[in-house]
Amino acid sequence: MKRIILSFVPLMCLTFMQAGAQDLSSRLEELNAIQFKEAVEKSSRTAILPIGVIEKHGPHMPLGTDVYTARELALLASEEEYTVVFPWYYFSQINEAKHQPGTIAYSPELIWAVMQETLDELHRNGFDKIIIVNGHGGNNAFLEYFCQCQLSEKRDYSLYWYQTHYDPAVVKKAESMTMHDEYDQHAGNRETSMVKAIVPDLVHPELAGTQKGVDLDRIGNLSHVYTGIWWYASYPNHYSGDGSKATEEAGKLILDSVVDDLVKVIREVKADKNVPALQSQYFEEAENPLDTKQPY
């Protein structure tokens, strides 16, 4: 009996190993070290870094709204086009909401350093292409400058920031199922509907009307200037829009559309040879600018 058991256990282990190999998780944190090596190759050495933040989202949404959204988009897309997805990431620019309870605002130096080291570590572990999926609007200016600064020194990987695209026709259809939201930017109709489709138990549209999400326009006296206080001047409640009519059905409609677009982008990035080649050429020329052909 003992001999039978001893020979049977390895066979069971082999069966589970084979099943695991066929169903390789795209969630980096779920992979073991052996599976990770396989995942790097299966993903064509492509990873997604989904970025969110911890901040107020009106009176009706969870503080982790942007974290949930960015990672869900990445995970759903990775089911259709296999890509390794980094765990929850919330080191973001959120100085505009430090006056609201629950906001976790890291210093500019820290969010820069953590992102750069995260990218460098992903590359050290085999990824040559990294796609940022951002769920937080307050990151946009930071990410644009960060991406530009990747040219400040030679790097052997390419960074792509996915510019989330909302199909106007899909948004219009979703609005017909809910409402038109004049100030729809942050925790409004669209975002509330999407998060309702992701974590329905954490979203409470019935509370959305307890605070106002309209533009107070408190620096309308100024023209052609930018000031960091602009968001607080317009939306001190850190709420822009109206999420009271949001529905899970409308959110799923928008979510599916964005996922389809992201899948297309992932495939384009995997096939892309231009960015890596141009980066290599650029870094070589940047070392010897006097040798760069004029005109180009």
Image (cartoon, rainbow, N blue to C red):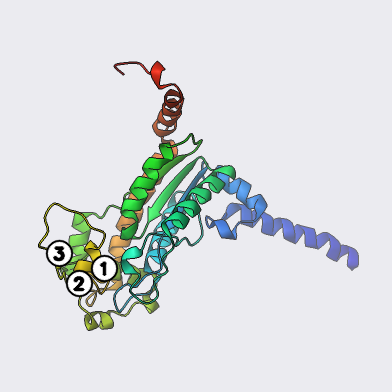
Q: Residue at 41% of width from left, 56% of height from top? A: 108
- Position of 156 compared to 245: left or right? right
Q: CA distance from mark 2 to mark 1?
A: 7 Å
- Give the mark nearest the N terminus, 3 or 2: 2
| Residue 126 visible in the snapshot | no
- Position of 31 compared to 188: left or right? right
| Residue 111 visible in the snapshot | yes
Type of amino acid under label 1: Ala
**Do the numbered discs 2 and 1 sit on residues whose CB atoms are within 8 Å?**
yes
| Camera-nearest residue between 156 and 257 | 156
- The percent coordinates of residue 15 (x first, y second) are 69, 57
Instruction: Give the position of the C terminus as an image quadrant.
Output: top left
Instruction: Give the position of the N terminus as an image quadrant.
Output: bottom right
| Tag 3 secondary structure | loop
Mark 1 — residue?
250
| Tag 2 secondary structure | loop
Q: CA distance from mark 1 to mark 3?
A: 34 Å
Q: Residue at 43% of width from left, 25% of height from top? A: 281
- The percent coordinates of residue 276 (x first, y second) are 44, 32
**Quadrant housing residue 17:** bottom right
Which is in the foreground here, disc 3 or disc 2? Answer: 3
- Residue 219 has which mark? 3
Q: CA distance from mark 3 to mark 2?
A: 32 Å
- Position of 1 compared to 234: left or right? right
Mark 2 — residue?
178
Q: Residue at 33% of width from left, 75% of height from top? A: 100
